[in-house]
Image (spheres, rainbow, N blue to C red):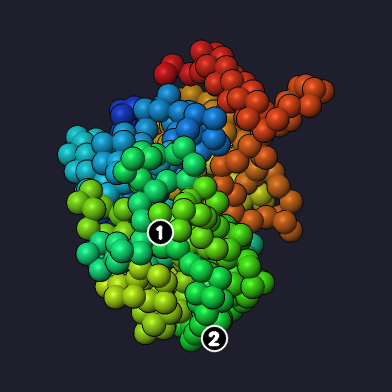
């Protein structure tokens, strides 16, 4: 490929989906991914669309916000959602994947596409010409400064954390038990392993967790750099390290990621005082991750502390938890709902750098950016999806919210416009009406504005 029609920077979830959408619409795409030439410190492979944190892509249920977003993406032919379905593993009502086979398949599909030129190199300056920046939360220092110089305003960033992964053979199944909450998943088999706590075991665990040593943040994550506002340990509320949550109260974890509701310990026939769930992390079932247990403890302290979890007394850690800086734009003053940069119509941003949180939100913004980049290059108007759709609502939120209150946002019904009803309805019925309205409005919009 000589001169591409479109340059995409970043081969993560958003960049990979954007490349596919643009290439499928006939554009010659050059996709840059800096790994393995330059490591991020959080990724483990050089595959495209590698999942760094959890291996769960959220609920698959059609009456959940994540399920609605998935159905909207299916309507537009999302490659990554297709690959996720093909590499799914048991996770109750959620869509979870074998992270290695998922990213490997995405890499193979994009590498073999005749309209995509995959280049392994760091991009240090903003490319000239039509471009999508999908460099993710771990954008390199050089590109971060280039973006900051463009915007003329500070980039924001927060600290994010990932959970440990343990080997299945090291889990004590005399204590841990298989089960899914209530009626989700396969009740005869159970999609999760559950490690139950007594009251005394929980209190000891919390005491140890609160006094355990944490990893000191690296200099680049605490100092104020030119054009970048320091986070000062500004954690994102949707992905707090467990030691930070534990500091909010003795029972904070028992009512959070360690809640026992809907799970009966077969040894006692009752709900345990608290528990930790382990989710299968690969197709072979040889690895499990600690659900909701992102952490910044030192590796030595993780081994000591997490082996206090009943059933994990001899746990072998395939990967320890860690924390890293996540960077995102001040999108309300820099982006349009089309995901175009306000002062440069041929420049798009997609993924977590826009302030959208969650795997599916990142993929969805890549999908929209890829479509809109193709549209403007084909002489068409870029689309702004209805705010009543989940993707439309996400894009509206990140580009219209008050900058003072701006925080990364995941798909949720709370960002949708209110229903046109004065009747008092329960949560399930409200969700059903949100979904029905979104699907209807999306079909009307597509028929009127698109050639999909």
Q: For residue 428, which quarter of the picture?
A: top right
Q: Is residue 72 visible?
A: yes
- In this rendering, is residue 167 above or below 101? below
Which residue lies at the image location 49% right of the left edge and 29% below the top edge? 62
Tell me residue 9's x, y (percent). 37, 52
Where, quadrant-wise, is the N terminus in this rendering? top left
* Residue projecting furthest to the right: 422
Residue 259 circle label: none
Where, quadrant-wise, is the C terminus in this rendering? top left
Q: For residue 324, which quarter of the picture?
A: bottom left
Count of numbered circles in the view? 2
Determine crowd level at label 2: few under 14, some 14-19, many 20+ residues with C-alpha closer than 10 A.
Answer: few
Determine crowd level at label 1: few under 14, some 14-19, many 20+ residues with C-alpha closer than 10 A.
Answer: few
301 relative position to 444: left or right? left
Dot 1 falls on a residue whose secondary structure is: loop
Residue at mark 1: 267
Q: Is residue 107 visible?
A: no
Which residue lies at the image location 70% right of the left edge and 30% below the top edge? 426
Tell me residue 421's x, y (percent). 78, 21
45 relative position to 361: left or right? left
Tell me residue 338's x, y (percent). 56, 36
* Residue projecting furthest to the front: 268
In space, the residues marked 1 and 2 are separated at their CA atoms by 31 Å
| Foreground of the two, 218 or 306 | 306
Residue at mark 2: 211
Which residue lies at the image location 43% right of the left edge and 51% below the top edge? 134
Dot 2 falls on a residue whose secondary structure is: helix
Query: Going from the N terminus, do you reach mark 1 or mark 2 first?
Result: 2
Which residue lies at the image location 63% right of the left edge and 66% below the top edge? 252
């Amino acid at each position: 490929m000589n001169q591409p029609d479109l340059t995409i920077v970043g081969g993560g979830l958003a960049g990979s989906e954007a490349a596919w959408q643009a290439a499928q619409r006939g554009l010659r795409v050059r996709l840059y991914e800096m790994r393995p030439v330059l490591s991020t410190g959080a990724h483990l492979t050089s595959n495209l669309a590698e999942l760094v944190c959890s291996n769960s892509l959220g609920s698959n249920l059609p009456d959940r916000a994540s399920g609605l977003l998935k159905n909207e993406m299916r309507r537009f032919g999302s490659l990554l959602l297709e690959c996720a379905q093909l590499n799914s593993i048991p996770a109750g009502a959620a869509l979870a994947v074998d992270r290695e086979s998922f990213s490997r398949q995405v890499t193979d599909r994009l590498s073999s596409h005749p309209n995509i030129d995959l280049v392994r190199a760091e991009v240090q300056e903003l490319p000239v010409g039509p471009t999508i920046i999908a460099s993710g939360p771990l954008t390199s220092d050089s590109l971060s400064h280039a973006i900051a110089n463009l915007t003329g305003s500070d980039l924001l960033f927060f600290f994010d954390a990932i959970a440990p992964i343990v080997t299945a053979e090291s889990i004590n199944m005399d204590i841990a038990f298989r089960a899914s909450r209530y009626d989700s998943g396969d009740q005869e088999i159970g999609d999760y392993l559950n490690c139950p706590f007594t009251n005394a075991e929980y209190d000891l665990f919390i005491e140890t967790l609160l006094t355990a040593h944490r990893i000191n943040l690296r200099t680049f994550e605490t100092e104020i750099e030119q054009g970048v506002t320091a986070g000062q340990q500004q954690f994102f509320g949707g992905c707090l390290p467990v030691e930070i949550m534990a500091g909010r109260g003795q029972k904070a974890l028992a009512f959070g990621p360690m809640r026992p509701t809907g799970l009966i310990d077969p040894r006692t026939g009752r709900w345990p005082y608290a528990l930790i769930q382990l989710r299968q992390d690969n197709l072979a079932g040889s690895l499990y991750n600690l659900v909701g247990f992102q952490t910044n403890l030192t590796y030595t302290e993780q081994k000591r502390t997490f082996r206090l979890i009943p059933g994990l007394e001899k746990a072998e850690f395939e990967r320890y938890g860690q924390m890293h800086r996540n960077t995102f734009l001040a999108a309300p003053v820099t982006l349009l709902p089309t995901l175009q940069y306000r002062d440069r119509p041929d420049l798009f941003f997609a993924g977590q750098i826009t302030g959208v949180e969650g795997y599916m939100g990142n993929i969805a913004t890549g999908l929209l950016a890829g479509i809109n980049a193709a549209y403007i290059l084909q002489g068409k108007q870029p689309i702004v999806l209805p705010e009543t759709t989940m993707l439309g609502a996400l894009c509206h939120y990140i580009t219209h919210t008050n900058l003072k209150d701006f925080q990364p946002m995941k798909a949720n019904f709370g960002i949708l416009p209110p229903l046109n009803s004065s009747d008092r309805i329960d949560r399930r019925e409200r969700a059903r009406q949100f979904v029905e309205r979104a699907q209807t409005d999306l079909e009307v919009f597509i028929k009127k504005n698109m050639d999909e």
